[in-house]
Image (cartoon, coloured by chain):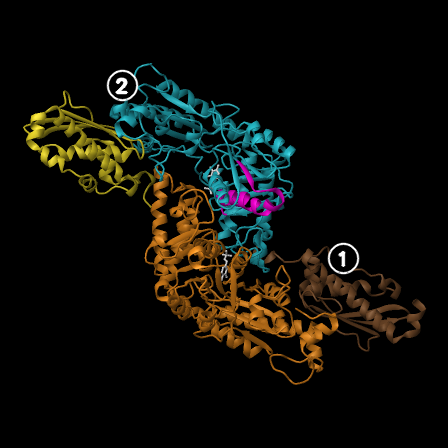
Chain colours: A yellow, B brown, C cyan, D orange
Amino acid sequence: MKETKEYTLYNDTVMDHFLNPRNMGDVEQADGVGEVGAAACGDIMKISLKIRDGKIEDARFKTFGCGSAIASSSMATELIKGRTLEEAKNFSNQEVVDALGGLPPVKIHCSVLAEEALKAAIEDYEAKQPKVALATA
Amino acid sequence: MKETKEYTLYNDTVMDHFLNPRNMGDVEQADGVGEVGAAACGDIMKISLKIRDGKIEDARFKTFGCGSAIASSSMATELIKGRTLEEAKNFSNQEVVDALGGLPPVKIHCSVLAEEALKAAIEDYEAKQPKVALATA
Amino acid sequence: MDKRSVYLDHQTTTPVLEEAFQAMVPYFREAYGSPSSLHRFGLQVREGLKEARQKIAQMINAESEEDLIFTSGGTESANLAIKGFADANVRTKGNHIVVSAIEHPAVMNSVEYLSKHGFEVTQVPVDIIGRINPEDVGAAITPKTALVAVHLVNHDIGTIQPVKEIAKITAEKGVALYADAQAAAGWMPIDVRDLGVQLLSFSPHRFYGPKGIGVLYRSRKARVTSHIHGGVQEGGRRAGTENVPAIIGAGVAAEFAVREMDQRVAHVAMLQKRLYDGLWKHVQYIKLNGPVPGPLRICNTLNLSTEFIEGEGQLLLLDYQGIAVASGSSCVSKSLKVSHVLSAIQLDHALAQGNIIMSLGKDNTVEDVDYVVETFAKIVVKLRNMSPMWKEFEEGVIDSVIAPTGRGKSFTQHAADISGKPAH
Amino acid sequence: MDKRSVYLDHQTTTPVLEEAFQAMVPYFREAYGSPSSLHRFGLQVREGLKEARQKIAQMINAESEEDLIFTSGGTESANLAIKGFADANVRTKGNHIVVSAIEHPAVMNSVEYLSKHGFEVTQVPVDIIGRINPEDVGAAITPKTALVAVHLVNHDIGTIQPVKEIAKITAEKGVALYADAQAAAGWMPIDVRDLGVQLLSFSPHRFYGPKGIGVLYRSRKARVTSHIHGGVQEGGRRAGTENVPAIIGAGVAAEFAVREMDQRVAHVAMLQKRLYDGLWKHVQYIKLNGPVPGPLRICNTLNLSTEFIEGEGQLLLLDYQGIAVASGSSCVSKSLKVSHVLSAIQLDHALAQGNIIMSLGKDNTVEDVDYVVETFAKIVVKLRNMSPMWKEFEEGVIDSVIAPTGRGKSFTQHAADISGKPAH
Ligand SMILES: Cc1ncc(COP(=O)(O)O)c(C=O)c1O
Ligand SMILES: Cc1ncc(COP(=O)(O)O)c(C=O)c1O
């Protein structure tokens, strides 16, 4: 048995992203913002994007939710930065799960929420950019 | 907690009569012998008496049965020695129980068996002595 | 420097008292016999069990130690009380059961089982501090009611129930009353005769006794059908080789609970007050669930909701700072459902999500409490900075439930709007 | 000088292994959390429980540790296996149960409970050494049979049952098979997959683990309805705060049972043989119940009947000499009934009365055994001198069952004659 204090609910990567979240906050004058809620548990996630030349230059999150929801949004924003919109549209929650080194089964929906928030932010961006939206359609 | 070896199933008096039974054996040329069986558990008790001048001069027992059956017959023979036949006919198992300092409820029937064995022995004696039997009738 | 370690989850379980543990030790490797055995290894154990039984009977002022049935825990005791009593009395009394809406799952699910097996169940609601109204219980009783089940104290929100008043009503109507005392035992005096209950259960692991042992008191008038069949242990009412060391430890824990009751309650109530005052002074937008510290609340528990942030995050950050607490938030439950207790007191969904339960114990100190207050205040700031709701509240998009500003929609409405489904 | 202390009742319960006890210790006062908690006190405990589960799964070669349900003991496990399986499968499979005539009361009384609740029960008899004939089981199965329950080893007479052969038949007929392995676990290798059973139960207190914990293995195909309702512990199949220290101790006991199996079995079988040889050499008119030491008998148990004297007296005199044994005699049972196992093997009533069960453990020695033989021989003399039956046998009034002389009536006849009622 290790010492009590060495035990954590999630693995080290998840704990690290929960305790020291990356990209926490709101992008100033964001090009796209997505805010989604999980009907399952009531979590809410908001992702804001800065997009330049079809690429995600910056991504930030705010999350109302459990540890794995916070870690998932932190990881999702990390992963997505620098990707093209096309790439981002194919982004799947599994990438978040893998990058986090796994999530408990009951918490997988947190990573889904991150995917949804990201896609909502892209949609928001595209909705504001009708020409680009058509071009990629 | 006392040491393991100090614990006994029955109280000290019962244990003493079980471990060092009094009057164990058969009266030589007994005047009366009673052997009874307990339907409840299968125990068998045999009491033999030496009777002189309407008094129980000697009483001995043999018992096939549990610790409290053995202790009950030991105590019953102790108690009955020196009593008149009249007294002995009024003998009750409660005397055995009391003299033993109590028996577990489920073992009371052992003392009853002792009473029955004693009375069977007296009956046997009286059956062999029709005149005496009539006189006391 | 090592962080302080503060265990604030005594309503889940407690460490075993040193004295109770020491009393148990010889029963593992020396006095290891089974009490059913006739030899000395068995007899040696019987004596200890009898003493333990007496101590526990004394703790609740039972008529006799024979009125106790030892089980494996609070859950089994509750199951036996409810299903065992229902089984034994359905023919003579009827097939209706009255239960409060905020009982522990051990009770709720036992009752639900019965409802699937021919019983009718009436759930009595509670008010917003989680109190059962005795009149509601009276009104729910029908000529077919066999049993009323109400807990003495709620495990989540700490509300003390008017069991004695309910007992007057059930006595008048000739209905048996079962009280789950698991959240109360050890933290307030319990007197089954004064209360007037026919059945009462608890588990010593909530007052410094061991796990693996539960108690069911049942007055001689209350017949209970046994549910674990086998040997004739516990007078034929609960079969199975006895968990001897646990019963021994339970006896010692009960003895100390009685002896130290006043002292423990005074200490813990003082800490509860200090914690309550400190938190409410240093943290904005938090709500107490259940009654304020005082005669309606058990001395060791505070249940609060922190607005705009979620419970698991609070729990984890507190844990990271060495503070162990519980939460009734949906994220914390395996079923992803908010505690049914919080739903029953009609707590707003946002507040239910931000739920935290802190339960004190006899070994917590003033320094612990001050550390918790300070740490909690920092954690709330950190999580609110991360929460989209906090900014939206500041911007007037959503409103506070605790201190409404009149600007913005409710959290629940907001959540429903963005998720496209009503939050549950 | 102190008398030797020889514990010969390992088929009732065993002391906890030092290593198992030491492993349990930190879980009482340090790692006292509940595994359901999300904080570190809870998490710390989860790890230990998982390891224990794995060790126990390995002990019986279960597919996965998820196939184990922890209960409070062997009795609860048997109840859950039988009633839980019956409940879950009565609609799809039927309401008929097949059981052997010599199962433990935990099984017998669970089955009896079902028989009062709409189930039909067929009892399969055993032969005079207590073996179930697999063909009898096959013949008892009907299209409505839901479950067959047979133990792996009989707790009283030590007979090893042909469970693997029975499993072939049940598999063929598509019926589930439950084996109560409580008298076997720790004393012979158990492989649930090789045996082909769907359910199997035991309790670690029989192989140097703690009391208060039982195991039910159930293969993924066997559905079991939970019987203790409440929280979602044990994957929702058995509610209630886990008895953490006991599970930890059980894990260590299982680990050692596997590791030391060969050695323990060899040692105990050697002692069993020596005890058997010694007793039969030094004491006349004793009968072995169950198979001779060898492949059909569990290595640690001898069940014998001493003619012309009763069991409790033998037990008490042995105890007085420091030797702890058990007995199936009616005087020893609270119900005053001879063990139903002895009745089922059609043991003469006189012999059933004189029953003694000696069960060896890993810490018994050759010296212990020699002391037991010597002491037992003396005790038998003492009790026979006290017994009216012995003299009546010598006088030719009653005859021996074990070695009939052709003179005298049977004990049973004699007892009936003098009590005026047939003995039972
Ligand atoms: C074969 C068998 N099954 C079940 C049990 C019941 O186990 P427990 O008393 O540990 O609950 C026993 C106990 O003696 C047994 O021998
Ligand atoms: C009020 C109440 N009743 C019953 C129980 C069930 O007790 P256990 O988990 O000890 O079996 C609990 C446990 O949390 C409880 O709080």
Vertical comparison of D102 with D230: above or below:
below
The range drawn in magenta is C72-98
Whether residue C368 is visible here, answered yes or no, is yes
> Mark 2 falls within which chain?
C
The rendered magenta stretch, by its main secondary structure, is classed as helix
Whether residue D12 is visible here, answered yes or no, is no
Name the spot of residue C410 as percent of width and height, x first: 32, 21
Q: Is residue A74 left or right of residue C322?
A: left
The stretch drawn in magenta includes residue C91: yes
Amino acid type of the residue tagged 2 in the rendering: Val
Residue C188, disc? none
Gap between marks 1 and 2 measured at Cα: 90 Å
Name the spot of residue A96 as percent of width and height, x first: 19, 39
Mark 1 highlights which residue? B99
Q: Looking at the figure, which quarter contains the N terminus of chain C?
A: top left
Q: Observer-nearest residue: D329 or C179?
A: C179
> Mark 1 falls within which chain?
B
Name the spot of residue C122 as percent of width and height, x first: 52, 35
The local secondary structure at tag 2 comes to loop
Q: Observer-nearest residue: C293 or D9?
A: C293
Amino acid type of the residue tagged 1 in the rendering: Ala
Mark 2 highlights which residue? C397
